[in-house]
Amino acid sequence: MANSSSGESVAERIARILETFDAERSVQTPSEIARRAGLPSSTAHRLVTELVGTGLLDRDADGRVRLGMHLWEVAQRGSRALRLREAALPFMELVHARVREHIQLAVLEQGEALFLERLSDARAVSNITRIAGRLPLHASSSGLVLLAFADDELRERVLARPLPAVTADTVTDPGRLRELLARIRQEGIVVARGFVEPVSTGVAVPIRQRGRVIAALSVVLPRESPTAGAVEELRRAAAGISRRLDEPAE
Amino acid sequence: MANSSSGESVAERIARILETFDAERSVQTPSEIARRAGLPSSTAHRLVTELVGTGLLDRDADGRVRLGMHLWEVAQRGSRALRLREAALPFMELVHARVREHIQLAVLEQGEALFLERLSDARAVSNITRIAGRLPLHASSSGLVLLAFADDELRERVLARPLPAVTADTVTDPGRLRELLARIRQEGIVVARGFVEPVSTGVAVPIRQRGRVIAALSVVLPRESPTAGAVEELRRAAAGISRRLDEPAE
C-alpha cells in the first residue's frame, strides 16, 4: 500500500519533499518541489496537499509552500538536539561574553559535523557555518574533534576516502590527519588555523556525556589571534556542560 | 495508493507517529508508538522502519526509537522559526544580561502561544514554559500580546469559547478580556501578574515585521518585582529585532 511502483516508500518521498527546503529555498511552488525532489508532479502535488493537512507544511494564499511551524515544533519537542542545546546555551553565553567572536556547538551526523547552535558577535571574523548547516569532519575544528573521538570504523572510513582541500591549509594527507587526530585525543583540543577559511582559526574541544564524546564546542577567531584565552574558556564551558548533562533529568 | 481503508493518508499517519514524541517520551518502542498514535501495530512498525530508513527517526541497538537528528536538521534549515530566532537571539541576550530572569520568544500557532526560544537564569523564578512548548493565548503574557494583535476572526473565536482559569488571577470573563486586549493594542505592552503561575509576573511586548505583529517577546519576573526596567529593555529589544527583520535578506 505504501510503496510506489519504484519500490520507494511514501516515507522516503515525504522525506525528499521536506529536504527540498533550505535557507535559500524556504518558499516553493509544488512544481518546484516536485522537480527538486525528483517526483512525478501529480505525486508531489498530492503529498504536499496531505502534508499541508497535517501542519507539517504551510500553504499561503498564492499556493506557495513552506515548512510548517508544526514541523519545527515536533522536531524540537522530543529531540536530543534541544536537550543538548539547553544544557550548552548558558555556558556558550558565558564564553560569548568573554570571547566576543563566534561560539558553536556541533554533533556528528551522517559523517559530517552538524551545527546545532551558534552565538555570534556582530563584529566577529568571517564564519562559514550556519545553524543546521554542516562542515566536513577533516576540515573544521569541530569536525576534527568529533572525528578524533569517533569509533574506529568511521575514522578509518574517512581516512580511506579522498580528503578535499577546503583551503590551502586543510590537512588532506591521511598520514598527517591520523597524527593530528591522535594528538587531539591526547590533548583534548585542536587549533585549526585556516583549515576552513583562510582568514580564521577554529579552536574546538570535546563535550562528554558519561565519559563519551557526544559533541564539540568551538570558537572561530581571526587567524592570527592568540588562542590561549579561548582555549581556557572552552575547556571550562565544556566541563560545565558535561556536568549538566550528567545530572539526573528533572 | 497512499490512503488506508480509513481514508487517512500516509502523511497523516507519519505526522501522528512524529507527534507521539515529546520531552517525556523521547525514546519509545514501536509498540508504544503504535498505541499512542492509535495505529494498527503492523502499520506503525512498517512506517517506523521506513522513517528510520530516511533518518527522520533513529533506532538504537535495543530497537528503541527516537527522533532523528536529521528531522531536526530538516525542520531547522528552511524554517521561519530559525530566522526569527537568529534575528532575536542577540537582542534577547542583551535583555538577559540586564534582567537576569527568563526571556522568551513566542509566536501564534494553531490558536496557542508557541515558545521558540527561552534564555533563563539559574536563580530565576519558576517558569512553566518550555522551548517548543505552548501556553493558552488568554493566560500567558505572550499569548495576550499575540491575541491582541491577531485578526478579528481568531480573537472573536477565542472570546466565544470557554476561558479556563490557569490560576485565580487568569482573566476568564470575555468582557474583561476584551478590554484588556484593547489596552494592549493601545499601549503595546501587557503586565500579567500571576495569570499563569501565582508566583510570577509576565511582561510582554509585540515584535513587528513590516508593521505586522509576528511574535511576542516576554520576561517572567517574581510576582512583586518592579517591572519598569524590564519594560524598557523589552521595548528596546523588540525595536531592534524589528529593524533586523525589516533589513533586506543577505
Image: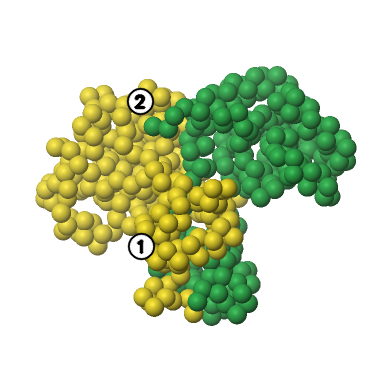
Chain colours: A green, B yellow
| Residue B77 visible within the image | no
Q: Residues within 10 Å of mark 2 (few under 14, many from 20)?
A: some
Residue depicted at x 48% and y 38%: A83
- Quarter of image, res B160: bottom left
SS under mark 1: loop
Q: Residues within 10 Å of mark 1 (few under 14, many from 20)?
A: some
Asked if residue A83 lies left or right of residue A199, the reply is left
SS under mark 2: loop
- Residue sitting nearer the eye, A192 or A84: A84
Asked if residue A87 lies left or right of residue B129, the reply is right
Looking at marks 1 and 2 on the same chain, the residue that comes earlier in the sequence is marked by 1
Q: Which residue is mark 1?
A: B38
Tally the numbered discs: 2
Disc assigned to residue B124 = 2
Residue depicted at x 36% and y 56%: B36
| Residue A228 visible within the image | yes
Residue depicted at x 74% and y 23%: A187
Chain letter, disc 1 residue: B
- Quarter of image, res B224: top left
Query: Looking at the picture, how far across and down is residue B3, in whole percent?
Result: 44, 76
